[in-house]
Amino acid sequence: MGKPRRTPAPAAVSPGGDERVVELTRRLASVLSELGLSEVEVESADVRVRVQRTSVVAPAVIAPAAVAPAAGTAASDRPLVAEVGGPALVTVEAPMVGTFYRASSPTADPYVQEGDVVKEGQVLCIIEAMKLMNEIESKTAGRVARILVENSQPVEYGQPLFLIDPQT
């Protein structure tokens, strides 16, 4: 007679299908970080994957705490508190999504340090967006009270970057 017929396994039961979805998810998560995106979705014939990252944006100024932090508390564990000047501080926010850099190159000195006096229009940092380097300038003259973002960290639109005390 003829050869026996083989019936292919259904797509949902195919071996390696789960591994393919996991690999796709990992690649999409990598793309999110690399491009500074907050969400990406891909749909193929039988697979739909959506990866979304949530970011917590700290408020620009938080009222000073009534209790001083413990002596052994690390700086990153403390809430963002404006030490002096309170509400008089000017917030410089990210005008775009991208990667925050404090200097023009990895070997260069940072544009500004906490405590530096800056002029209006002076470059404070760079935000890289889609391989373009965008200089972020100070909105006002004053003293840099706080730098709220670490070097090489992704930032979101409207995220506070610097607190500047214009009274100095």
Image: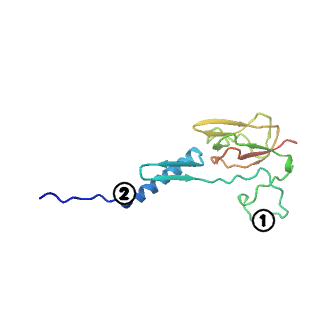
Q: Who is closer to the viewer here, 81 or 35? A: 35
Q: Which mark is residue 17?
A: none
Residue 82 percent location from the top left of the image: 81, 52
Label 1 environment density (alpha carbons within 10 Å; few <14, some 14–19, many ≥20): few
Seen in the picture, residue 83 relative to 68 is either above or below; the reply is: above
The amino acid type, in three-letter code, at marker 1 is Ala
The amino acid type, in three-letter code, at marker 2 is Ala
Which of discs 2 and 1 lies nearer the camera? The answer is: 2
Does residue 102 appear to the left or right of 9 in the view shown?
right
Residue at 69% x, 49% y is 149
Residue 94 percent location from the top left of the image: 70, 42
Q: Which residue is mark 2?
A: 11
Question: Disc 2 on helix, strand or loop?
Answer: helix
Earlier residue among tags 2 and 1: 2
Does residue 163 appear to the left or right of 18 in the view shown?
right
Does residue 104 appear to the left or right of 17 in the view shown?
right
Residue 37 in view: yes
Choose top left, top right, bottom left or bottom right for residue 97.
Answer: top right
Choose top left, top right, bottom left or bottom right for residue 108.
Answer: top right
Cα separation, mark 2 vs mark 1, equals 59 Å
Count of numbered circles in the view = 2
Q: How is the image coloured?
A: rainbow
Q: Which residue is mark 1?
A: 71
